[in-house]
Amino acid sequence: MFHGVGVNAGRVLGQVLQMPATVAEPAVTSPKDAGASLEANKAAIKSAAKTVQTQLRNRAETASAESKDILHATAQMAGDPMLIKAAGKLVSPDAPGGPRSPARAIWEAGQTVADTLTALGGYMADRATDVLDVRSRIVAELQGLPAPGIPVSPAPYILAATDLAPADTATLDPTKVLALITAEGGPQSHTAILARMLGLPAIVAAPGVDGIVDGTQVYVDGAAGSVTTNPDESMRTAAATWATQAAQMPAFTGPNTLADSLHIPLLANVGTGDDARKAAAAGAEGVGLLRTEFCFLDREKEPTIQEQVAAYGAVLAAFPGKKVVIRTLDAGADKPLPFLTPADEPNPALGARGYRTVATSAGVLERQLTAIATATAAHEAEVWVMAPMISTAEEAAQFTTLAKSAGLQTAGVMVEVPSAALTASAILSSADFASLGTNDLTQYAMAADRQLGPLATLNDPWQPAVLKLIKLTVEGACQAQVSTGAPKPVGVCGEAAADPALAVVLVGLGVSTLSMSARSLAPVAAVLATLTMAEAQRLAAVALQAVSATSARESVREQLPILAQLGL
């Protein structure tokens, strides 16, 4: 048995297929390239990189919103001038140690860039994996080999890997892949997020699963975080039962209510108009998070106001008369943009990202707010706008003023930084609402990079410290009441909202709305419908009193028999 961190529930049985071996390290020289001129070798590198970039962009055109963002970001990295320039120097006769073949030059240049990013730590260290993935694709193109990627099989299988690159996870076919198991990665890695989006049982940070022999039959329990080889009859029965339960999960049609008829709206996290239409069809009561980055990614220049209006309008059109919460540009860290974020920050996760870019790139936020206001005027959706990475009451007041000056009536903030939770009352004295980004709030509270497998147990939203920050935010909202005497609204749009058991705790802590991927709406609604607010509050108290994330999760799950009945 292998143990890891379960990031999406489900019990499945199937044969393992490992990710194919990575592209082999190329020779320093090759007969094919030996007689080529310096310019020809440089041109070969540029051409291969351009081809890979085009391939990734083409794949992005038919991908989901989450996948589209990842593929565009990876495509941008394939054309990184720093990588191409470094490789070009290595094919020169003047290169230290002599000229390399184009494939070897890209290999060494990619390693240098990856090492630099790893040394920076935080989000940038995670981008090192993306660089090595791009490196392998360019080398394969230069050598005339198939690009690395997801294995092809006529039968469904359980995909195992050391970790999965973003460009791989973005092209998973959920009709063929039964579950994901990785030896590395964290609960908020690309693998974990896309597994939830696709509805695939998944376990990360499970050492040893990348050594399971192809064809081995295994049992994967996503809730327990365990992988078992040579499963016994009880596990076969459990997998069959879960398949039946999953097929019978009632569709969510809204509105979402607790057993005592209290309405807790379930909203969707979206990135594009297509995303929004699918969420509306899945019953979402609105949008709790519109990620606007998709409009900016893979761009050398800022998109025009007209381009932004069209992109936002496609989402607003799917939810006439319903709330749509738009997050302004969350650039920086793992989402660098050449026209907005500096490339030389020593610690980008703690640098100029989110709202902080107003200090380094004047006018970008104002133009985005103008685009949002223009799109709002042309549609019937109830638009709320919020800024990411707000740390102080002063920043909250500045953003609220900017938003309302643009004609947007409801302006709020993301609570992702512990300081925002600790000073929620002051922040919400000017902001109209708050939305908890539990992914970043957890990693900042626990000082644990959310992409790192060895820190997966720390980077868990069930951590009592994180739950207490959420509680403090809600208490701050109660202190900053609106004129009617009601607390300022506090929602959750981080991955925590998609966990049905944790959703119960969040509601018990006083969160007023939950936003998640469209696939998570039905299971979360099914669990919440069995509880009253008093019961949710009691379970929230149980979680707050726990001494660890594991004990908090287990204590709450033990008192929710509905989870077992639904296979969650």
Image (tube, grey):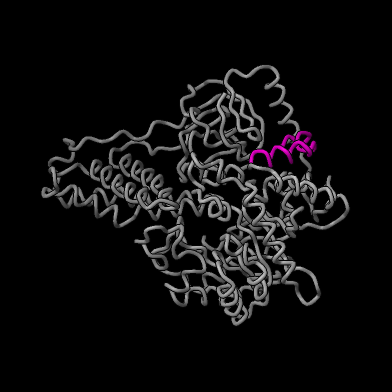
Residue 446 percent location from the top left of the image: 54, 50
Q: Residue at x 61, y 73 (%)?
A: 375
Residue 183 among magenta residues: no
Q: Is residue 331 visible?
A: yes
Farthest right residue? 260
Where is residue 202, by image quadrant? top right
Residue 392 placement, left or right of 509: left
Q: Residue at x 77, y 52 (%)?
A: 508
Q: Which one is nearer the viewer's eye here, 163 or 395?
A: 395
Q: Residue at x 30, y 41 (%)?
A: 139
Residue 347 placement, left or right of 212: left
Residue 399 percent location from the top left of the image: 57, 75
Q: Residue at x 62, y 55 (%)?
A: 275
Q: Main secondary structure of the magenta part?
A: helix
Asked if residue 185 is positioned above or below residue 335 in the image, the reply reads above
Residue 297 percent location from the top left of the image: 46, 60
Q: Which one is nearer the viewer's eye here, 179 or 343?
A: 343
Residue 287 placement, left or right of 110: right
Residue 144 percent location from the top left of the image: 30, 38
Magenta residues?
549-568
Q: Quadrant of the N terminus?
A: top right
Q: Is residue 374 visible?
A: no
Say how many tags the image has. 0
Where is residue 460, by image quadrant? top right
Where is residue 427, by image quadrant? bottom right
Residue 139 placement, left or right of 197: left
Asked if residue 283 is positioned above or below residue 5 in the image, the reply reads below
